[in-house]
Amino acid sequence: MSNEATGSTQLWNEDLAPTTAAQRTWRWYHFSALWVGMVMCIPAYTLSASLIEGGMSGYQAVLTVFLANAIVLLPMLLIGHAGTKYGIPYAVLARASFGTAGARLPALMRAIVACGWYGIQTWFGGQMIYTLLGALMGGEIGGGKIAGLGINGAQLLCFLAFWAIQFWYIVHGMEAIRKLETYTAPLKILICFVLLGWVYNKAGGFGDLLSTPSQFVEGGKKAGQFWSTFWPSLTAMVGFWATLALNIPDFTRFAKTQRDQVIGQTVGLPVPMGLLAAMAVIVTSATVVLYGKAIWDPVDLSARMTGVAVLVALLILLIDTVSVNLAANLVGPAYDFSSLAPKLISYKTGGYITAAIAILMMPWKILESTQGYIFTWLIGYSALLGPIAGVLIVDYYLVRKTELNVAELYREAGQYAYGNGWNTAALVAFVIGVAPNIPGFLNAAFPASFPDVSAGFKTIYTYAWFVGIAISAVVYGLMMKGKTVPAVRAPAHP
């Protein structure tokens, strides 16, 4: 499709155009590898820790993680369908519901969240290089902290070194990322078994953490409080991949068939995520025996290993963090920034912008100051992204019946222009979907400034993603009833 055919150079560039048959190289195992690659990451490993600290037993924590990922798989598959059917990225799909100009709002929201994650994961990667060098040199490196930055010179250089490794993949594009994910996924699974074997031999078993009952049982510290912990935890776990549930068309547009994306994602997400949580619990259980305390941070654990083990463990974690960060936090914002001004910003330029923001935001400061990682960061942005998912799903399935006129998605004054490029129904549904969660968010993020938020709003906030997706779906469905122009059937990809 050329930009002459679409009638607008403002909404079209080579990267945002529908994928051609030649570009559709992803089979089901590529999607499974992508998900195994993304699931095996440090924040996902440490998620179980937050659940066990909240009072759950090991089994309850693993089941909660598995259930959340089974739930988030549904919007993944539903929204991913459009990517495979029409070969379009998330930022273009959003034009059908939000309007050709309005789609920039959900694209920007998704991009900002991803930039935050990209910076945080880059910092984790830099810290691993720093730990590795410290282990090789036999002690702390880098000297005093740099004024204004709050980290020392060696930490800054390690952060920039890891940033540079990822930059190579931005320059070499999507195919380089697919190859990285496919080749590293089996390696990560192998390492999991090696790690389990190592702790089993070292600790002479898997420790007591596995048999420790939850604190919610009768006579426990938090007797009878299971559900009040379970729901916010489930929402946070859903929030963990809520970003990907939106921009999954950025990947599924490269799928050979619908079957490839459906099987690949179903095999690759819920079960590996549950197994990783189980492994985290088992390994941490053994660390209690080995070191006298639970060590949930795999970097800290790797640093305690001796000899060649520390080198191998940290190198694997480094490869792991690169593959996760590129897939989960770079591809989406690169397309999203491109969609803001397609004439000026290509996919690669969008990637450069993401990488630049990651440095400017000084992620180590965010990690330092963000109290309550689960309640403020994960649930907070799930409250924003849930309503967008609700609008996209209802628009694509109920309003359009999966029929889109692809050429019109790239026309400024076409079928999806609504009023001046904005669809009021989508905006209203989004605002009403987010609104009930705002008081609870303010209370969770700034308890000292907003202490008087009612129990009702706090309860709603614990279900943030679910509340947002449900309200926006209903409001959008009602407002769009009988308003749609039937799509001219456009030839879809097989």
Image: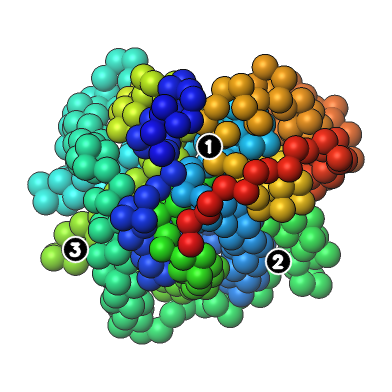
Q: Nearer the viewer, mark 1 or mark 3?
A: 1
Picture quadrant of residue 443: top right
Residue 41 at least partly seen: no
Dot 2 lies on which element? loop
Residue 216 at least partly seen: yes
Q: Which callout, 3 or 2, points at the residue further toward the start of the chain?
A: 2
> Which amino acid type is marked by label 3?
Val
Residue 292, numbered circle: none
Picture quadrant of residue 215: bottom right
Q: Nearer the viewer, residue 294 or 327?
A: 327
Which residue lies under the disc numbered 3? Answer: 312
Q: Quadrant of the N terminus?
A: top left
> Which amino acid type is marked by label 1?
Ala
For label 3, the crowd category at 10 Å Cα-Cα, with few meaning under 14, some 14 to 19 and many 20 or more, is: some
The way the protein has been coloured in the rendering is rainbow
Which residue lies under the disc numbered 1? Answer: 407
- Compared to residue 268, the image places residue 6 above or below, namely above
Q: Nearer the viewer, residue 185 or 139?
A: 185
> Which amino acid type is marked by label 2?
Gln
Dot 3 lies on which element? helix
Which residue lies under the disc numbered 2? Answer: 215
Residue 61 in the image: x percent, y percent? 61, 67
Image point 76% across, 46% down: which residue?
399
